[in-house]
């Protein structure tokens, strides 16, 4: 007797005792317990029932009830996330437009601050700069 047949015998016994609940995980004492019949064994039993022609009924020893089939998960339709650069493009363009509105005044103010931060040249410094000999 093969291993799958032994597993199927145990699975048939669980289906007789517990019915559809044997195929579902159970929440007991705050913890999840795995189903009594694994998905692999349940799939093998379903395939065997289709092959034997007993799909659609369960007489206690053979077959598979279509109610036991797992419900397909619904597909979630979500918009692709894309790159952050493409998602925030509109905001970045708006920010640039807002910053460019008074950019000429900011540039003038920056240049004036640079010019005012430098100390004024004294007479001595101007004399030194002009009296340097070029070409030596």
Image (spheres, rainbow, N blue to C red):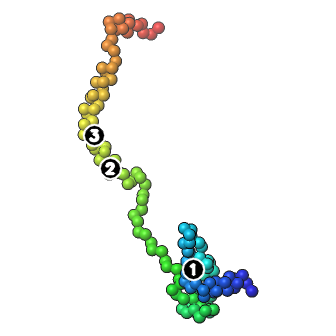
* Residue designated by label 1: 23
How packed is label 3: few (under 14 Cα within 10 Å), some, or many (20 or more)? few
Residue 3 appears in which quarter of the rendering? bottom right
Q: Secondary structure at mark 1?
A: helix
Give the Cα separation between the discs numbered 1 and 2. Answer: 51 Å
The x and y percentages for residue 38 are 61, 77
Q: Which mark is residue 91?
A: 2
The relative height of residue 50 versus residue 71 in the rendered view (above or below) is below
Residue at (39, 54) in percent of width and height: 86
Task: Give the camera-side residue of 13 and 107.
Answer: 13
The answer to the question of whether label 1 and label 2 lie on touching residues, with beta carbons closer than 8 A, is no
Task: Give the camera-side residue of 52 and 12.
Answer: 12
Number of numbered tags placed on the structure image: 3
Q: Earlier in the sequence, mark 1 or mark 2?
A: 1
Q: Is residue 133 visible?
A: yes
Q: Earlier in the sequence, mark 2 or mark 3?
A: 2
Task: Give the camera-side residue of 85 and 53.
Answer: 53
Q: Is residue 43 visible?
A: no
* Residue designated by label 3: 100
Residue at (43, 54) in percent of width and height: 83
Task: Give the camera-side residue of 49 and 136.
Answer: 49
Give the Cα separation between the discs numbered 2 and 3. Answer: 14 Å
Residue at (45, 74) in percent of width and height: 74
Q: Which mark is residue 10?
A: none
How packed is label 1: few (under 14 Cα within 10 Å), some, or many (20 or more)? many
Q: Is residue 113 left or right of residue 27?
A: left
């Amino acid at each position: 007797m093969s291993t799958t047949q032994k597993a199927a015998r145990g699975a048939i016994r669980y289906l007789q005792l517990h019915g559809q609940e044997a195929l579902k995980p159970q929440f007991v004492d705050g913890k999840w317990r795995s189903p009594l019949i694994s998905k692999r064994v349940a799939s093998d039993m379903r395939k065997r029932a289709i092959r034997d022609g007993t799909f659609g009924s369960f007489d206690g020893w053979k077959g598979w009830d279509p109610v036991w089939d797992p419900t397909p998960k619904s597909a979630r339709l979500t918009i692709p996330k894309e790159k952050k650069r493409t998602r925030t493009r509109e905001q970045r363009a708006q920010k640039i437009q807002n910053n460019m509105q008074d950019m000429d005044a900011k540039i003038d103010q920056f240049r004036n601050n640079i010019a005012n931060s430098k100390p004024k040249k004294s007479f001595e410094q101007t004399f030194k700069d002009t009296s340097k000999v070029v070409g030596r």
